[in-house]
Image (tube, helix red, strand yellow):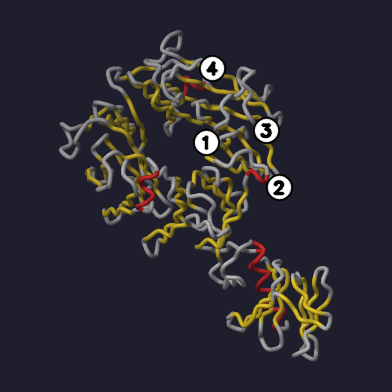
Amino acid sequence: MQKHNIFLFVLLLLIIFPGINGQEIFRFDHISTRDGLSQNTVSAMMCDKEGFLWVGTNNGLNRYDGYSFKVFKGNTNESGIFINNRITDIWQDEQDFIWFMTHDGYYHYFHPTIERINSIPDFLVKEAKDNTIISDIEPYNSNEIWIGLRSLGIYRLQYDAEQTDYKTTRFLNRGQYALSNNNVSFVRRDSTGNLWIGTRRGINFLSKEDIESNTPNFQHFFVDYSFTTFSETKDELWFGTQNNGLLIKNKSNGVYTQKNTETEPLFKNNHSSLLYFSKKEHLYAAFENAGLFCYDISKKDWKYIRTAGKNIDRIYEDRFGQIWITSDKFGIDRYDPETGESKHYRLSPPDRENTTDLERHVFFEDNSDNFWIGLHEGGLALYRRNEDRFRFYLNEPSNPNSISSNIVASIIHDRSGQLWLGLGQYLGGIERVILRNPGFTHILPQQEIKEVSDNITRSLHEDNEGRIWIGTKAGRLHVLDSLFNQLAVYEKFKTDNGWVSGANIYTIITDHDGHIWLGTKGKGILVSKNR
């Protein structure tokens, strides 16, 4: 293979496989309302089983096929159709329905085949004081979903294959199958198929046998306790309460024990706000205004974890077993269960921390084990594991290849592994992330550009001296040496008939005598006089 063919082959590989093993971002490709998106504030994204991208905006639900958008919006004249067009979350269930949540607190599911939308709850009377109508959702199996509501009881959805829809049953604190209380905080299926429903007044238990026989006889326990959170370990069930600390049920003998400020000297109060069981079999428990604690199951020992804030918001465990913790303070904490050490990272630039109330972290790990965090006003952060630091991507107004907004509300990848971002505010929209391949050198013919066309390459050629000739859409011809240092830039060419400018060069060759031939679009053929 000739030398110039090898060069072109390598460049072709770069074009076809731009993200192989990439650890850095090469550029961001923008998709916005100019391309058919219904609105530029994107708060949720999801790739379905067919490969469509679903995009939730402040003005409707969008389905993107890679070429065009189809937009779905609410209809205020029909009951059961969603009436709030601000989409806040999207996911797909086992029956391939597309679920989404709207800002008014309702859940909706979309039938892709008939394009019909059902809403949960199925009434439009606003009983809740805020927009938190639904507190929890539990896919019990592929045909059944249980949904807990903040003050409106429980919904059971059972798939009807003949109707290709869900049959809905509602349970309240009255009637034949009564709950202990209508204010539901969690709905959880344990490893044996039993269902546990935490409420403001007690735990409601439903056995697997009762669920399968369709006789939901709820059993009520600890009706004087207000329950907040749930977690399951190998041998125990853990329940968090608002005023009574932690309840732990032993699976083998059914005995309950309690952990609170009287039994555990480390605890500062009894308001349990979060429970999480890690892959390394550590139980993490957060308490209101009192921080986070770790319980080693094997050693039966509690440890306090140092964090920047005392009110823990979320816990995320990455594929390397690191525990990432967000709280009411800016930044994020990383806890290493192997060493027992924690470290705080500042994510948003100090001058941006005053422009937003929360960073609203969005966590995502891609197929190459890159760990990304999207931030509200802090852009996109990539964690460099080897260096134990973050690399930040922020909007640069003068750089059209930079991220278009510093509000990153969603991070996903499609079935091919392509990374996509959902951005907020008027400069937001969707970003397709093009990763840099460390095996290649990126060459910018024009370092500082005024138009995107300045660096769109139309032609490429390596001459007999190893020089690289690059023709761009902007009508320039760049000449580089073998080390890619720029030797010259031609914007116009002197000929026997005068000067030729604006020549969009589509092809370049060197003849046997060493003359350079340029084939242009509309300007004819230009041939160099010198070799």
Residue in the picture at 84% in, 74% down: 524
Q: Type of residue at label 1?
A: Asp
Mark 2 sits on what residue?
67
Give neighbour class at mark 4: few <14, some 14-19, many 20+ (Cα, 10 Å).
some
Give neighbour class at mark 2: few <14, some 14-19, many 20+ (Cα, 10 Å).
few
Quarter where residue 223 is shown: top left
Q: Type of residue at label 4?
A: Leu
- Tag 1 or tag 3, which sits nearer the N-term? 1
Q: Where is residue 322 in the image (x, y as percent from the top left)?
A: 36, 52
Query: Of all residues shown, which one is farthest toward the front?
Result: 498
Give neighbour class at mark 1: few <14, some 14-19, many 20+ (Cα, 10 Å).
some
Q: Do the residues labelled 4 and 1 touch (CB within 8 Å)?
A: no
Q: Do the residues labelled 2 and 3 touch (CB within 8 Å)?
A: no
Mark 3 sits on what residue?
112
Q: Which mark is residue 89?
A: 1
Q: How far apart are marks 2 and 1 (CA)?
A: 23 Å
Q: Which mark is residue 124?
A: 4
- Tag 3 or tag 4, which sits nearer the N-term? 3
In this picture, is 472 found above or below 360?
Answer: below
Give neighbour class at mark 3: few <14, some 14-19, many 20+ (Cα, 10 Å).
few
Q: Do the residues labelled 2 and 4 touch (CB within 8 Å)?
A: no
Q: Position of residue 58 (x, y in %)?
A: 56, 35
- Tag 4 or tag 2, which sits nearer the N-term? 2
- Tag 3 or tag 2, which sits nearer the N-term? 2
- Tag 1 or tag 4, which sits nearer the N-term? 1
Q: Where is residue 42 in the image (x, y as percent from the top left)?
A: 55, 41
Q: Distance between the residues labelled 4 and 3?
A: 24 Å
Residue in the picture at 22% in, 43% down: 302
Of helix, strand and loop, which one carries label 2? loop
